[in-house]
Image (tube, rainbow, N blue to C red):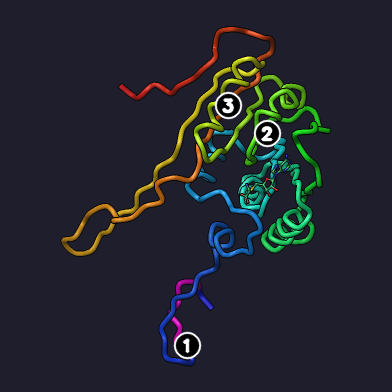
């Protein structure tokens, strides 16, 4: 069967068939925890500079949506998850997408208690109180390493930013991603009436080699 072919079902319905993309799988897979929304997954990959061979610690793993995107991008991924049922679900999802021999493991571990890994390039956090991880991340990341946190509420972001201010991290940046679909049909060309207006705020920071009062925040200048 050639992808993109049209088939008729036994009930006479016409359907077009494609292999699922990784995103299709992520949106359809069984979920324990709420997954990170697609618009944010893409941005997280770019802003935490993920690529082949990059050593990433991800916590919590939840349903494994972000894990799957990190594996697809070629990263070496270590996962921490608090709940055994979620860890199992994530493992099933990851193995279904990448096969039984996928090089990925999730450990049942509370990251607030510490990180038993070192020499990490990136730490990505999708959990409610990421400020408990800042000191652990200072020891586990390489200098220049990136800490990224995904948080739904601004009071959490402010708490994290206060803790980052007194830390070894610099170039701290917070942003959100707004994606608006468009309706394009004949002469009706306009934004969709509805959009997912809020999911989460993304905060990134880079580990400095030594404490420094400068280089606290970072912004990308708009092009001239
Ligand atoms: N990013 C995931 C969803 C994560 S949901 C995805 O894309 O699918 C948040 C997860 O963090 C939950 O599964 C929760 O159990 C886990 N969690 C919360 N606190 C934690 C902690 N201290 N250590 C490890 N995992 C934690």
**In the image shown, does 64 or 45 lie closer to the viewer?**
64
Residue visible at 66% across and 48% down in the picture: 67
Q: CA distance from mark 3 to mark 1?
A: 54 Å
Q: Could you classify mark 3 by the number of other residues whose Cα lies within 10 Å: few (under 14), some (14-19), or many (20 or more)?
A: few
Image x and y of residue 44, in percent: 55, 39
Q: Residues within 10 Å of mark 2 (few under 14, many from 20)?
A: many
Q: Where does the image place residue 62, in percent across and percent down from the top left?
A: 67, 51
Read off the residue under disc 3.
Answer: 159
Whether pointer 3 and pointer 1 mark residues with C-beta atoms closer than 8 Å, the reply is no
Residue 132 higher or lower than 125, as above or below: above
Given this view, does label 1 or label 2 mark the residue nearer the observer?
Answer: 2
Residue range of the region highlighted in magenta in the rendering: 3-8
Q: Secondary structure at mark 3?
A: helix
* Left or right: 224 as drawn, with respect to 116: left
Q: Residue at x 74, y 44 (%)?
A: 79
Question: Image point 65% across, 33% down: which residue?
Answer: 130
Residue corresponding to mark 1: 9
Instruction: Give the residue at mark 2.
Output: 123
Q: Is residue 71 left or right of residue 223?
A: right
- Residue 101 at x, y percent in the picture: 79, 57
Classed neighbour count for the residue bearing mark 1: other residues with Cα under 10 Å, few (<14), some (14–19), many (≥20): few
Q: Quadrant of the C terminus?
A: top left
Q: Secondary structure at mark 1?
A: loop
Q: Earlier in the sequence, mark 3 or mark 1?
A: 1
Residues under numbered marks 1 and 2 in contact, where contact means CB atoms less than 8 Å apart = no
Q: Which-is-in-front pick, marks 3 and 2? A: 3
Sequence-earlier tag: 1 or 2: 1
Compared with residue 144, is residue 8 higher up or lower down, i.e. above or below? below
Q: Nearer the viewer, residue 203 or 73?
A: 203
């Amino acid at each position: 069967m050639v992808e993109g072919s049209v088939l008729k079902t036994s009930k006479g319905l016409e359907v077009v068939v494609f292999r699922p993309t990784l995103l299709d799988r992520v949106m359809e897979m069984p979920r324990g925890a709420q997954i990170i929304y697609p618009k944010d997954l893409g941005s997280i990959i770019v802003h935490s500079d993920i690529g082949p061979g990059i050593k990433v610690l991800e916590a919590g793993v939840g349903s494994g949506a972000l894990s799957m995107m990190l594996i697809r991008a070629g990263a070496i991924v270590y996962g921490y998850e608090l709940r055994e049922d979620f860890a199992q679900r994530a493992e099933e999802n990851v193995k279904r997408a990448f096969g039984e021999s996928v090089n990925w493991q999730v450990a049942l571990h509370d990251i607030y208690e510490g990180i038993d890994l070192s020499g990490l390039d990136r730490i990505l956090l999708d959990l409610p109180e990421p400020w408990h991880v800042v000191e652990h991340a200072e020891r586990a990341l390489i200098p220049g390493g990136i800490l990224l946190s995904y948080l739904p509420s601004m009071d959490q972001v402010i708490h994290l930013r206060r803790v980052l201010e007194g830390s070894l991290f610099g170039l701290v940046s917070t942003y959100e991603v707004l994606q608006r679909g468009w309706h394009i049909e004949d002469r009706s060309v306009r934004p969709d009436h509805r959009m997912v207006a809020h999911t989460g705020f993304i905060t990134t920071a880079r580990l400095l080699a030594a404490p420094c009062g400068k280089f606290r925040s970072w912004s990308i200048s708009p092009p001239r």
